[in-house]
Image (cartoon, rainbow, N blue to C red):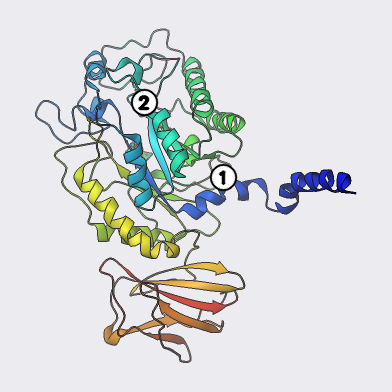
């Protein structure tokens, strides 16, 4: 009998995942990303060497080759000067993890064409620098070890490769003779094959620089399908195709490839049900390191932006622009630590949550999460209410209990005809954002007007 049971059990176990999985493929592929809600963007490359400054002008960053109109030969000299001796992948990944981030998207290649990894197909890469260490290999190993997803930002636009077209308008020294865009696409594909085979499982491929005329919808479709053929469950942003609506970043109506929208430096006014999106944003004014930029957003502002985004059903990809020595700016570290302290207490109100069922709450934001047959509402208080009474629009579900997330103190509440009034007196407030949990029976579907 035993002889039969064991093989039968094995077959059952083998079949189990396919039986249990009733979602369609896409649903499944996006699950980790939807739960994660918070990731780190890293813009790093040769542009960290000039650190935003060129011939007396100081407003540059990762675009410096174009914004300062630096000839290619001159820009290439940064290769010999890129030697980030203090780079420590373990430290970077720990800083992201301690901030509560679940994934890291780093520039495998930005518009300047420089590759942070060891590529067989170009010498314009990290192996030509004095550093000679594959940064992406070290980071991906650390991410795997520390449980974060490793993701690549890969620019379609390339100001270095001879086959990429068009040239910059100001470039006079680079002939287009013999340039063949198809050759460029094949170069990019070979690099994407490297990036999806030598670094383990990759979470997201985050394309950018898709807006020039040489990049077409057909090429976008082809590239999306190609990357999916390399790793089937990889997630790809909408900038692979031509569907992006300006800086708002969401995808226009129509047949466009891309798994999520990419609002840049902005948060949509409202979320869109059924649409995945991720706001990417800088902590100061630049993506790449700029030593003069001290226009830092406060930790409170960043925490509230994360909450705001989660309340609208989106993800937050928060940027760090490391210095040329391989370290994060002190201001970025401080902010990551502050966010981490908040996430340690309130992370449950962010991870795996869904958009608010309420349209507008004067005092703050709301996220929600299904908990068995109940729903937990997380009420994020930005502005402390008068008389310590928090007023919420009513709904038909029966309330089970209310408590302050920090300290778990139970709270009294009253239900009047059209709203719910929660007594916040005596609870410990948090200067960044206080969170109240309200557990209700069932799924919330009707919300009354306040
Ligand atoms: O990598 C960072 C920046 O270097 C890069 N994206 C972030 C994540 C970036 N590239 N360009 N910009 C930011 C600003 C350029 C915007 C424009 Fe457009 C490109 C204006 C017109 C073409 C966006 C795309 C708005 C319309 C189309």
Residue 429, percent across and down? 28, 74
The residue lying furthest to the right in this view is 1
Give the camera-side residue of 8 and 268. Answer: 8
Disc 2: which residue: 116
Residue 124, percent across and down? 35, 17
Could you tell me how far apart the alpha carbons at marks 1 and 2 are, in whole angstroms? Answer: 35 Å
The residue lying furthest to the front in this view is 2
**Residue 173: which quarter of the image?**
top left
Question: Relative to 244, is 60 on the left or the right?
Answer: left
Mark 1 vs mark 2: in front? 2
68 up-or-down from 241: above or below: above
Residue 108, percent across and down? 40, 29
217 up-or-down from 373: above or below: above
Disc 1: which residue: 254
Whichever of callouts 1 and 2 sits on the residue coming sooner in the sequence is: 2
Q: Are marks 1 and 2 in contact (CB under 8 Å)?
A: no
Residue 25, percent across and down? 66, 46
Give the camera-side residue of 73 and 86. Answer: 86
Residue visible at 39% across and 27% down in the picture = 157
373 up-or-down from 209: above or below: below
Quadrant in the picture for the C terminus: bottom left
């Amino acid at each position: 009998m035993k002889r039969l049971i064991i093989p039968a059990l094995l077959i059952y176990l083998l079949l189990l995942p396919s039986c249990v999985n009733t979602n369609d493929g896409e649903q499944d592929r996006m699950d980790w990303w939807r739960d994660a809600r918070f990731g780190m963007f890293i813009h790093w490359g040769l542009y960290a060497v000039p650190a935003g400054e060129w011939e007396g002008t100081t407003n540059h960053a990762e675009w410096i080759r174009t914004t300062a109109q630096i000839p290619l030969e001159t820009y290439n000299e940064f290769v010999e000067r890129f030697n980030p001796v203090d780079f420590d992948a373990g430290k970077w990944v720990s800083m992201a993890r301690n901030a509560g981030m679940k994934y890291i998207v780093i520039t495998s290649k930005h518009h300047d064409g420089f590759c942070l990894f060891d590529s067989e197909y170009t010498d314009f890469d990290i192996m030509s620098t004095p550093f000679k260490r594959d940064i992406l290999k070290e980071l991906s190993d650390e991410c795997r070890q520390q449980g974060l997803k490793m993701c690549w930002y890969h620019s379609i636009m390339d100001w270095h490769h001879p086959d990429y077209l068009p040239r910059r308008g100001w470039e006079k020294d680079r002939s287009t003779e013999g340039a063949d865009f198809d050759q460029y696409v094949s170069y990019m594909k070979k690099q994407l094959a490297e990036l999806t085979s030598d670094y383990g499982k990759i979470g997201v491929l985050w394309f950018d620089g898709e807006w020039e005329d040489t990049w077409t919808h057909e090429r976008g479709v082809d590239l999306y399908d190609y990357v999916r053929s390399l790793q089937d469950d990889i997630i790809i942003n909408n900038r692979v195709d031509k569907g992006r609506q300006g800086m708002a970043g969401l995808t226009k109506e129509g047949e466009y490839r891309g798994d999520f929208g990419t609002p840049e430096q902005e948060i949509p006014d409202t979320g869109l049900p059924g649409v995945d999106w991720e706001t990417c944003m800088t902590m100061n004014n630049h993506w790449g390191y700029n030593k003069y930029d001290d226009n830092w957003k406060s930790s409170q502002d960043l925490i509230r932006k994360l909450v705001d985004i989660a309340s609208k059903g989106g993800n937050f990809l928060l940027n760090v622009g490391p210095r040329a020595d391989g370290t994060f700016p002190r201001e970025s570290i401080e902010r990551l630590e502050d966010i981490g302290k908040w996430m340690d207490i309130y992370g449950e109100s962010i991870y795996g949550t869904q958009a608010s069922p309420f349209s507008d709450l004067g005092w703050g934001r709301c996220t929600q999460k299904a908990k068995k047959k109940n729903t937990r509402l997380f009420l994020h208080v930005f502005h402390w209410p008068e008389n310590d009474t928090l007023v919420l629009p009513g709904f038909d579900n029966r309330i089970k209990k209310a408590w302050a997330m920090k300290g778990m103190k139970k709270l009294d509440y009253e239900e009047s005809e059209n709203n719910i009034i929660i007594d916040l007196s005596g609870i410990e407030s948090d200067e960044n954002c206080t969170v109240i949990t309200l557990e209700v029976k069932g799924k919330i579907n009707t919300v009354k007007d306040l």
